Amino acid sequence: MSEAREIREQTGRLGVLMPGMGAVATTLVAGVELVKKGLAQPVGSLAELGTIRLGKRTEDRVPKIKDFVPLAKTDELVFGGWDAFPDDAYDAATVAGVLEKEHLNAVRDELKEVRPFPAVFDPAYVARIDATHKKEYTSLREAAEQVREDIRSFKSENGLDSAVMVNCASTEAYAQPQKAHFDPDAFEAALDRSDPSISPAMVYAYAAIMEDVPYANGAPSLAADIPALVDLANDRGVPVAGKDFKTGQTLMKTMVAPGLKARMLGLAGWYSTNILGNRDGEVLDDEQSLKSKEVSKLSVLEHILQPEKNPELYGDISHVVKINYYPPRGDAKEGWDNIDIFGWLGYPMQIKINFLARDSILAAPIVLDLALFMDLAQRAGMGGIQEWLSFYFKSPMTAPGLYPEHDLFIQQMKLKNTLRAIKGEDLITHLGLDYYE
Ligand SMILES: NC(=O)c1ccc[n+]([C@@H]2O[C@H](COP(=O)([O-])OP(=O)(O)OC[C@H]3O[C@@H](n4cnc5c(N)ncnc54)[C@H](O)[C@@H]3O)[C@@H](O)[C@H]2O)c1
């Protein structure tokens, strides 16, 4: 057994701050409020419903995760955030159209109270939104200071000791790290001169880290995954994780691909196409935002299948991902996957997956888990990149030079073993030979 980490006690309620209070964020808030009233179950939340085996199989010690590690309780969560529209969470959820009126009306009063701060908004990064609720500032430094002030006032108005930030804002235009992103000093200087390479997503991430608020990025936008902000998070001991919630098609991909590889079945091609009609889909209809999403989705297979290790099976894969905006669908997205595999002696076979998903229904429990686990990480003294939360992301952040682990089942083992390590329990290797000795 390793030594348990010291975990600071959770005092008072936990603030969950979300830049972007659209479909995902409001589905989370409504869901948690329904759970608080005993009107719904937090389906899809590992933190709330999952169990964790401890010790040997013969010991029969399988507590719920939330009873094993000291997570904040759902009753103790308080929500806030920023949006480019002034709607409260009730109106925004109505526009998003994810949840039925019956569900929304049962928590109407609670949702009405959740009103966003004005956004740090730049149309160069999100072209498809005509923001009506944005901050006035003369420099990005001022914008960052305003977000920091929002965090402080949210905490003091709600009497909170701690908060976490989960980015649920629209996907920004594709960007790669620039000079200004390489170290904290360069980043600070870039804030002062309002360098155009600093995006709103980075401003929120910076503000969170400076306020010692753990930051998780649910969008594919470049944010805390730049060296400047990783260094800052390491220096300040603030947990960061990202990016791009793993829902829908990528979730399926990271379940099926490890299975094919486990049985050494070959892959000739994987054609994925999606239609979606919510605001996320509309934003992704812009070429630059779409690129962020496509890049995030594409790398998954390569990392799972490792073509360089098995060129005869995975050396020549044609991987295509298409996303099409189709308004009649709203949040009820549909994904089709055509998977061309081959087996013994190279004989071809096909798998078709038709996933009629609900995007925000899949994403909301991820936001909940990230909020609870990021807060735990903070209280357990784990600053910097939280690779153990890769389970939740399409493009997991890792230490420089490490390739990301995409296989959902390895990610799950990593997550649970991290919880075991935090509590000083034996890690589970699934070896099992000792049962037969
Ligand atoms: N739903 C999923 O399954 C899923 C999966 C992976 C990633 N995501 C990502 O999560 C994010 C949210 O998705 P959604 O379906 O809720 O989208 P949405 O369009 O319903 O909500 C996004 C909200 O962000 C706001 N916004 C835009 N720019 C902003 C800014 N600079 N500051 C503050 N608010 C801003 C918009 O006004 C909007 O209300 C998107 O980036 C999406 O790509 C969603």
Image (spheres, rainbow, N blue to C red):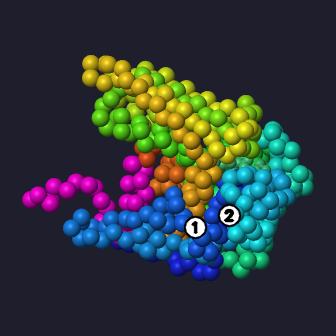
Q: Position of residue 376 (x, y in %)?
A: 52, 68
Q: Which residue is rendered at x = 39% and y = 48% of the image?
A: 409
Quadrant location, the N terminus:
bottom left
On whether residue 110 falls in the magenta region, the answer is no
Residue named by callout 1: 40
Which amino acid lies under the numbered mark 1 shown in the image of this protein? Ala
Q: Are marks 2 and 1 in contact (CB under 8 Å)?
A: yes
Distance from disc 2 to disc 1, alpha carbons, whole Å, reads 9 Å
Q: Which span is picked out in magenta?
A: 409-437
Residue named by callout 2: 103
Q: Secondary structure at mark 1?
A: loop
Q: Which residue is rendered at x = 76% and y = 62% of the image?
A: 89
Q: Which residue is rendered at x = 43% and y = 68% of the image?
A: 65
Left or right: where 58 falls relative to 290: left
Left or right: where 133 falls relative to 28: right
Q: Quadrant of residue 142?
A: bottom right
